[in-house]
Image: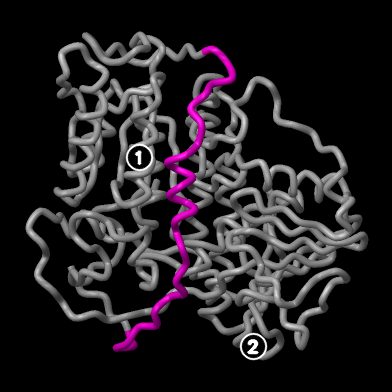
Amino acid sequence: MKPCTSKPDSIRKPDCISRSTRRRFLQSTSVLLTAPWFVPGRVLGAEQNTSPPSERITVGMIGLGAMGRGHLHYMLQLPQVQVLAVCDVDRWRREDAQRMAAEAYAAKQPSGTYRGCAAYNDLRELLARPDIDAVMIATGDRWHALATVLAGKAGKDIYCEKPCSLTIHEARVMIDMVRRYGRVFQGGLQQRSTPEFVRACRLVQQGALGKVRAVYVNFPGTSEEVNLPPEPVPDGLDWDLWLGPAPWRPYHHRFHPYGRPPHVVPWHFCRDFGGGNLTSNTVHAFDVVQWALGMDHSGPVEIVPPETGQVAVLTYKYANGVVLQVVPGRLNPAVQEIPPGWDPQTVIQPFGALYVGERGWIHVGREGYLAAHPAEILQQPTEKPGADRPLYNHHLDWLAAIRSRTDPASNVESACRSTMVSHLGCIAHWMGRALRWDPEREEFLDDHQANLLRSRPMREPWRLE
């Protein structure tokens, strides 16, 4: 194995954001069900929790960083779920997760003890268990596609954190695999299950703004090639398996702080492992843009980065004339048209979007933020979710889809297409030139070099098939 040959000796620290809202989402959503549960989960044996074994979905947790621990905490509260196994290449994290599961289930047992949650270093061992129905994948981006494909082929349904993939090619393989094997896939783009985003996107879709001209989102910035000095691998960390299909490079604590995770994605500044803000953060906004514009099976046709000198910020153009821009916080009157009724001092909501149309604008963000001009736009009625699905709960939506064998809110096509939008922006930045994109064929037009960046080689012995 050869070390990665990165060029710069320094790194640019990615823009920092508050991740408290995402953690609160995982820890505060309701656990009420809207329909009776009956899923033929594998029989687990003796005393477990208040639901009989035949009504539980058995789950394995893969990746136990900040997001994975949040998912685990929530799953342990659900009587219709049994967490049978946890997996992480960090010994402290997997043992701590195993302890969390044991304590949560023991508290519900007459005996006050529980030892039914296994802990694995290698996800392949977890996936080989026939008694696990579904998995939640919260690893780094480099593992998302590979773990999803391995899980689907092993007969598991899947919840995969955002971004769905590290490359465009991986996203396409994921779509094809999920459809071929008939798996239920939920992307970790939870805004598809939150009321303010549901309402905003439906208003746009039903023409409340008339023809949409422009959309603005926040969090610009991508990753870079970096070199960090080698450090000793912590005892208890399987560094080779942490890297997985990514190029080999020496351990450094900035890629993975051993033990309790301090934040969500410490490694996304490195191009080998992620795409920086565009894939870690802006992907949430791209998802609700794609959704509102009816582009869940398509995407933009042109991407123009600021490196060209043609635009001030990363700019996407759709075939229907809509222009999408990634702005650094606020609209700039010097380079963007300020819509009537908009205060230029207003910050575009993190993970949200500002939709501007011929009849006004809608601005949506997390935790109930929803504004419009004219204000009467928000008084228009919108269709509500069907009575057979959980209201505004991304985890329960996934579990309901497993039961009904239907697509959840963030299905594989929409989640992967939104992820592709992030990758398109990264590639345009890295190439430093405007790119034309065919969303049907999923290739750049007349640009061989850009097309090469749609995929990356995987380190032996890993293959995506």
Residue 443 in percent (x, y) is at 61, 63
Residue 459 in percent (x, y) is at 28, 61
Tell me which corner region of the image, top left, top right, bottom left or bottom right, holds residue 133: top left
Disc 1 element = helix
Q: Which residue is mark 2?
A: 308
Name which residue type carries label 1. Leu
Over which residues does the magenta segment extend? Answer: 7-36
Question: Mark 2 or mark 1: which is in front?
Answer: 2
| Badge 1 density bin: few <14, some 14–19, many ≥20, Cα 10 Å | some
Residue 42 in percent (x, y) is at 32, 15
Identify which residue, 71 or 231, lies in the foreground: 71
Identify which residue, 13 or 16, lies in the foreground: 16
Q: Which residue is mark 1?
A: 150
The tag on residue 387 is none
State the residue at coordinates (20%, 29%).
102
Relative horizontal placement of residue 166, taking residue 120 as reference (left or right): right
Does the magenta-highlighted stretch encompass residue 35?
A: yes
State the residue at coordinates (60%, 37%).
409
